[in-house]
C-alpha cells in the first residue's frame, strides 16, 4: 500500500504541478531569449546612430566647403571681369597709339611702333593669357563644386536610408519589448499557476491521505447542484440528487478520483456516457454525462488517469460532470464533498 501511495503522489505531481512549472520555466527561457534580441537591436541602433552622426558631419563639411568654393568662384569671375576690362582699356590705348603713329613722320612712326605699339600688343596678349588661366581655374572650381554637390546628394540619400533603418530597428525593438512585457505577464501568471498547482498538489495529497480520493478534475471546481434534495431541474430528474454537479468546458478531462477497476461503462438514458469504478476502500465512484468514455469494464485505472471528457449527454441541462461516491453499485450514495 505504501508503494501505491508513492506512485499516486508521483502522479499528482505530473497532474497538478509539473505542467505549470514547465510552463513557467519555458516563459523564463523565452524572456531571456527576447532580452538578448533587444540587446542586439540596441547595438544596431547605436551603430546606426554613430553612422548618422558621421554622415551629418560629412554633410556639414560639404556645406562649409561649398561656401568656400562659391567664394573662390566669385573671386575668379571678378578677377576675369577685371582683366577683361583692363584688356578693353589697353585695346583703346593701342588704337590711340596707332592713330598717333600715323600722324607722325615715317621715322617717328617707326619709333612709336617699336617702343609703344608693340609693347602694348604684348601687354594685351599677356592679359588675354591671364584670362585663359582664370577661365581654366573657373572651370576646375565649377567641376569641383559639381562633384561636391553630387557627393553631398549621396550623403543626404545615405542619411535618409539610415533614418529609415533606425526607425525600422526601433519599431522592431518596441515590438520585442512589448513581447517581453507580455511574456513577463505570462511568466508571472505561470508562476502563480505553478504555486497554485503546488498548493493543489499538496491539498490533493492531504485529501488523498485523509479520504483516499482526489478531485476528478485537474483544477479547482465549483458545484452547480449539490448532494441531496433539490428542485427538479428538468421535471423528470427527481428531487433527490445522489451526487454533485461540477460545471466546466466541453472536452475537459475527467480523471479517476482513486485507483480501481471499472465495473460499469457505457451509455444510460439518464446518466449519458458514464463509468463506475470500484475501489479497494469499499467505495465506488460515478462519472456521468461525458462526451467521450475512454474506459471499459474490467479495466484497471490509476489515480488521476483520464476516464473521459466532460459533456452533456443523457438527462442533462448543460456541460458538467455528475460525480458520485457510493458504497455499492447504484446504492449507498454519500455526499462526495466529504471526500474531494
Image: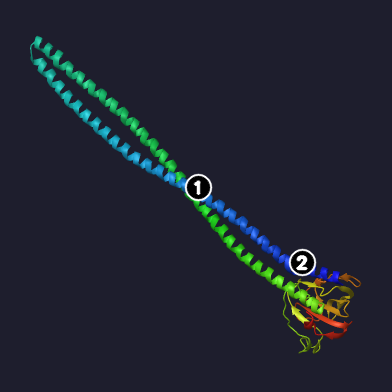
Q: Residue at x 37, y 33 (%)?
A: 143
Mark yes or no: residue 254 visible. yes
SS for tag 2?
A: helix
Of residues 144 and 113, the one drawn nearer to the viewer in this rendering:
144
Judge left or right: residue 38 versus residue 287. Answer: left
Disc number for residue 47: 1
On-image quarter of the C terminus? bottom right
Q: Residue at x 21, y 18 (%)?
A: 122
Of residues 113 and 167, the one drawn nearer to the viewer in this rendering:
167
> Which residue ends up furthest to the top in the rendered image?
107
On-image quarter of the N terminus? bottom right
Mark yes or no: residue 305 visible. no
- Residue 68 falls in which quadrant of the image? top left
Q: Which residue is mark 2?
A: 14
Task: Give yes or no for contact between labels 1 and 2 (Cβ–Cβ under 8 Å).
Answer: no
Mark 2, residues whose alpha carbon is within 10 Å: few (<14), some, or many (≥20)?
A: some
Amino acid at each position: 500500500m505504501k508503494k501505491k501511495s508513492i506512485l499516486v503522489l508521483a502522479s499528482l505531481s505530473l497532474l497538478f504541478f509539473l505542467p505549470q512549472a514547465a510552463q513557467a520555466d519555458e516563459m523564463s527561457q523565452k524572456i531571456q531569449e527576447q532580452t538578448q534580441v533587444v540587446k542586439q537591436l540596441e547595438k544596431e541602433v547605436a551603430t546606426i546612430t554613430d553612422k548618422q552622426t558621421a554622415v551629418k558631419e560629412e554633410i556639414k563639411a560639404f556645406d562649409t566647403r561649398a561656401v568656400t568654393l562659391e567664394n573662390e568662384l566669385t573671386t575668379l569671375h571678378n578677377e576675369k571681369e577685371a582683366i577683361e576690362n583692363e584688356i578693353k582699356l589697353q585695346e583703346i590705348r593701342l588704337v590711340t597709339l596707332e592713330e598717333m603713329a600715323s600722324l607722325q613722320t615715317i621715322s617717328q612712326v617707326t619709333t612709336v611702333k617699336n617702343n609703344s605699339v608693340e609693347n602694348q600688343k604684348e601687354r594685351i596678349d599677356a592679359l588675354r593669357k591671364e584670362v585663359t588661366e582664370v577661365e581654366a581655374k573657373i572651370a576646375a572650381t565649377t567641376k569641383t563644386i559639381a562633384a561636391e554637390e553630387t557627393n553631398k546628394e549621396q550623403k543626404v540619400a545615405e542619411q535618409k536610408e539610415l533614418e529609415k533603418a533606425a526607425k525600422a530597428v526601433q519599431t522592431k525593438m518596441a515590438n520585442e519589448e512589448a513581447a517581453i512585457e507580455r511574456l513577463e505577464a505570462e511568466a508571472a501568471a505561470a508562476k502563480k499557476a505553478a504555486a497554485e498547482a503546488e498548493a493543489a498538489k499538496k491539498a490533493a495529497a492531504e485529501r488523498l491521505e485523509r479520504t483516499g480520493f482526489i478531485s476528478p478534475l485537474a483544477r479547482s471546481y465549483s458545484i452547480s447542484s449539490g448532494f441531496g434534495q433539490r428542485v427538479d431541474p428538468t421535471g423528470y430528474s427527481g428531487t433527490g440528487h445522489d451526487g454533485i454537479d461540477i460545471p466546466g468546458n466541453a472536452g475537459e478531462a475527467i480523471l479517476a478520483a482513486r485507483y480501481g477497476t471499472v465495473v460499469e461503462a457505457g451509455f444510460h438514458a439518464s446518466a449519458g456516457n458514464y463509468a463506475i469504478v470500484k475501489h479497494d476502500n469499499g467505495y465506488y465512484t460515478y462519472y456521468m454525462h461525458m462526451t467521450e468514455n475512454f474506459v471499459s469494464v474490467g479495466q484497471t485505472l490509476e489515480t488521476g488517469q483520464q476516464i473521459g471528457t466532460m459533456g452533456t449527454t443523457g438527462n442533462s441541462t448543460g456541460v458538467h460532470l455528475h460525480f458520485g461516491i457510493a458504497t455499492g453499485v447504484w446504492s449507498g450514495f454519500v455526499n462526495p464533498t466529504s471526500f474531494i
